């Protein structure tokens, strides 16, 4: 799979480790700058798995996607 | 053996859910659950998987081919898990299969995923609040994620 991904570090609220936005076929991954390096990598891995697994094309709820994502982490 | 419609209704009622609530949980229209339960239509495999995951039962059980499903936890077992959840940083899923603990946060997360203007997924704590996701929503707007 090939995807265009740009990654940004930004101070986010403590309960948000990261998020990814899909816009015009490009993914922007934002990782919470306040996390440790290891936690940043885990958050980045979580976001990349969303992209790899085709989660953005799924019809089920965002919550169901998160449940699957955290089970497979 | 029970039919898929009977199984689905039985599982839904056991969780005290209306057809609308179940439809929202798995991302289909309310009428869809109704036609599944009445046997008018059969779900796609993708929906079957979503139902199986949500109810924590095998697809075979849902289809009425097996009589034994995953058992529910006893109240004692739930108490132990609740204590672990309160005292641990480990991410536990809710006892009813939900991820987000805050209803408003759940709705906003769904909105931000479904709305093509945002199309966002998160790595967030189960305890995330609506305000935290609102911060992200505003950030997406500032970064030009919406037109």
Image (cartoon, coloured by chain):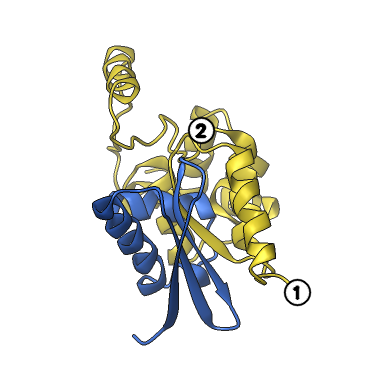
Chain colours: A blue, B yellow
Residue B41's mark? none
Q: Is residue B147 left or right of residue A20?
A: right
The C terminus of chain B - image quarter: bottom right
Q: Is residue A59 above or below residue B131?
A: below
Q: Where residue A62 sits: x, y (%)? A: 52, 55
Coordinates of residue A69 in the picture (x, y in percent): 36, 55
User: Which residue is pictured at 59% across the width and 50% down the height?
Assistant: B109
Which residue shows up at 30% across the image and 63% down it? A45
Q: Which residue is mark 2?
A: B101
Q: Chain of mark 1?
A: B
Q: Mark 1 or 2 closer to N-term? A: 2
Residue B65 visible in this rendered orientation of the protein: no
The chain ID associated with circle 2 is: B
Q: Examine the rendered structure and indicate whether residue B131 appears above or below residue A20.
A: above
Q: Is residue A5 visible?
A: yes
Secondary structure of residue under mark 1: loop
For residue B147, which numbered disc appears in the image? 1
| Residue pictured at 45% horizontal, 32% vertical | B96
* In the rendered image, the vertical position of residue B57 relative to residue A41, given as above or below: above
| C-beta proximity under 8 Å, tags 1 and 2 | no
Q: Nearer the viewer, residue A1 or B79?
A: A1
Tell me where residue A41 sits by quadrant. Answer: bottom left
Q: Name which residue lies at 49% across and 51% down.
A: A11
Element at badge 2? loop
- The 10 Å Cα crowd at callout 2, few under 14, some 14 to 19, many 20 or more, is some
Quadrant where the N terminus of chain B sits is top left
Disc 1 and disc 2: Cα gap in Å?
A: 31 Å
């Amino acid at each position: 799979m090939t995807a265009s991904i740009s990654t940004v570090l930004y101070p986010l609220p403590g309960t948000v480790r990261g998020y990814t936005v899909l816009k015009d076929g490009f993914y922007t991954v934002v990782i919470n700058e306040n996390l440790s390096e290891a936690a940043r990598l885990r958050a980045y891995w979580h976001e990349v798995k969303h992209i790899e697994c085709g989660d953005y094309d799924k019809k089920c709820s965002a919550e169901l996607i998160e449940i699957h994502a955290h089970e497979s982490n | 053996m029970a039919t898929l419609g009977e199984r689905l209704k039985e599982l839904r009622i056991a969780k005290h859910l209306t057809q609308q609530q179940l439809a929202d949980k798995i991302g289909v229209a309310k009428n869809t659950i109704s036609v599944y339960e009445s046997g008018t239509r059969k779900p796609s495999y993708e929906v079957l998987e979503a139902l199986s995951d949500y109810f924590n039962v095998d697809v075979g059980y849902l289809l009425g081919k097996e009589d034994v499903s995953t058992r529910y936890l006893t109240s004692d077992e739930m108490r132990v898990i609740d204590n672990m959840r309160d005292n641990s940083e480990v991410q536990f899923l809710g006892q009813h299969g939900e991820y987000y603990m805050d209803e408003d946060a759940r709705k906003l997360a769904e909105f931000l995923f479904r709305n093509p203007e945002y199309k966002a997924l998160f790595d967030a704590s189960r305890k995330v609040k609506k305000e935290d996701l609102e911060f992200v929503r505003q950030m997406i707007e500032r970064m030009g994620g919406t037109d």
